Amino acid sequence: MTDWIYVVAFYGVAGVALLGGLGVLFFRNLFHAGLSLILSLFAVASLFVLLGAEFLAGVQVLVYVGAVAVLILFAVMLTQRITARRVRRYTRALIPAALVTLGLAVVTVFVMVKVELPAIAPIPEASAIDELADQLLSTYLLPFEVISLLLLGALVGAIVLARKEERR
Amino acid sequence: MIIHPVLSWLNEWWQGVVATYGLPSCFVPAAQMVVHAILIGGFIAVLVLFLIWLTRKVSAHIQQRFGPMRVGWHGSVQTVADALKLMQKEDTTPRSCDRPVFNIAPFLAFAPTIVAFVVIPFGDGAIIRDLNIGVLFLFAITTINVIGVISGGWASGSKYSLLGGFRSAAQLVSYEVPLVLSALGVIMLAGSMKMGAIVDAQSRIWFVAYQPLAFVIYIIAATAEVNRTPFDIPEAEQEIVAGFNVEYSGMKFAMFFLAEFANMFLIAAIAATLFLGGWRGPWLPGEFWFLAKSFAIVLLLMFFRWTYPRLRVDQLMSFAWKFLLPLAFLNLIITGLILVLI
């Protein structure tokens, strides 16, 4: 009984995510495109919930919707001339871009069809976050530390950029 | 202790009805959701009516006035009259606005607040969903609020609302960081993000005793998150008329207003749950203690409002990034060290 609810929910949410992505591409107004991006990101967070990855969904909303998307909207608002102007949606590089995208799509579909993904044992809901935390600080410690170094680098870079502005 | 038995009795009765008439079993959770939604909606509506009246009375008495006195006992139904008036008002739309975004923005600002109430423990067992990611869910869902505010400010097509939108985007994003970091200390102590588990962990001593610094940071950052003075530059009346919602009228304005007051209570309820032991307290039912603690913090916020002058924009920013943030990190490091050493 509950299975078809999940199927309906998955296709509904995935559809919303795709619609949001299409909106980003086709809205001429940049602010509308930004809002559409938020819709898409939020739908992806819902997909995480459907997969039982609640923590990932929370982080997705907090980081992508709450911070990244808000910054994008903020930047669009600051550049008043951009919002007034209608964005050009086509470039001369249309054919190479289409080729690259098509190639990526072919590879993705090929991987999806050919490679058999390892079946993931369902994680008991209550311990999902504990499990994630343990894994991050034991099995995946190196990638975790490398990513934190990367973030630190980005942080320092941002500060350097901001300081230069000040000195002028 | 009051809500939970009533709800479970209602649920059992409904299960009986579904079983007797052979209705499909998905009617049980569906009815539960509808009841929960009605409860939250009703609670927020009554709460906001009361909070607006309380704000006016408290601010009036701090300034040695009486405030509303004529409608009902000490003006107690004044807000009902105001709400009726707002409903009758014409819903104006400025010509230079971006119509779809202008219409969506009030809902974007209000909806996350309702959703956030899902994980608030009102009393023993009186929590709608005790999610594993409770605290994270709260902070994640309330960030969507900002989007409503900035799109409202942008879509109005007025320079004052645009400025209000800017200011609130900058402020809310900045103060979100120390807010979440201060709650992290509590999560470390409780060892869980579940609201229920956090309340249970405080059955002996409130976390405010272990995390006094985090509590102060939380209260300051929370004041900024709900745009209260001294952090009310997004709607500084003397500078930018009323901020992002200048162009709104009628029910759309009421939605922003509802969101603001419901948010104020929400932020106080989170503080009560994370730092003041939630619904735990002697003798009286948990619901009473929860409301008493939350309203104590609401009153504290109102007291701030009429005590401190407004900060300047640059002061506000440097205060968040250069003072609150390092302090929050310091608190986090000390908490971690103590947890490891003991």
Image (tube, rainbow, N blue to C red):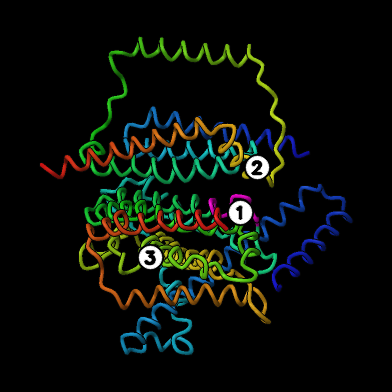
Q: Residue B179: x, y in percent?
A: 43, 57
Cβ–Cβ below 8 Å for labels 3 and 2?
no
In depth, the one of B277 and A110 nearer the eye is B277
**Residue B219, picture quadrant:** bottom left
Q: Is residue A98 magenta?
A: no
Residue under disc 2 on the same chain as residue under disc 1: no
Query: What are the residue bounds of the magenta stretch?
Result: B129-137
- Which residue in the rendered view is the most extreme toward the left? A168
Q: Which residue is mark 2?
A: A128
Residue B278 is labelled as none
| Residue B8 appears in the picture as rendered | yes
Is the residue marked by circle 3 packed among few (<14), some (14-19), or many (20+) residues within 10 Å?
many
Question: Marks 2/1: CA distance?
Answer: 12 Å
Q: Is residue B261 above or below residue A9?
A: below
Subunit under mark 1: B
Q: Residue A4: x, y in percent?
A: 73, 35
Kindly identify the amino acid type of the residue bearing the numbered disc 1.
Ser
Question: Marks 3/2: CA distance?
Answer: 33 Å
Subunit under mark 3: B
In depth, the one of B161 and B206 nearer the eye is B206
Subunit under mark 2: A
Kindly identify the amino acid type of the residue bearing the numbered disc 3.
Ile
Q: Residue B133: x, y in percent?
A: 59, 50
Q: Which residue is mark 1?
A: B192
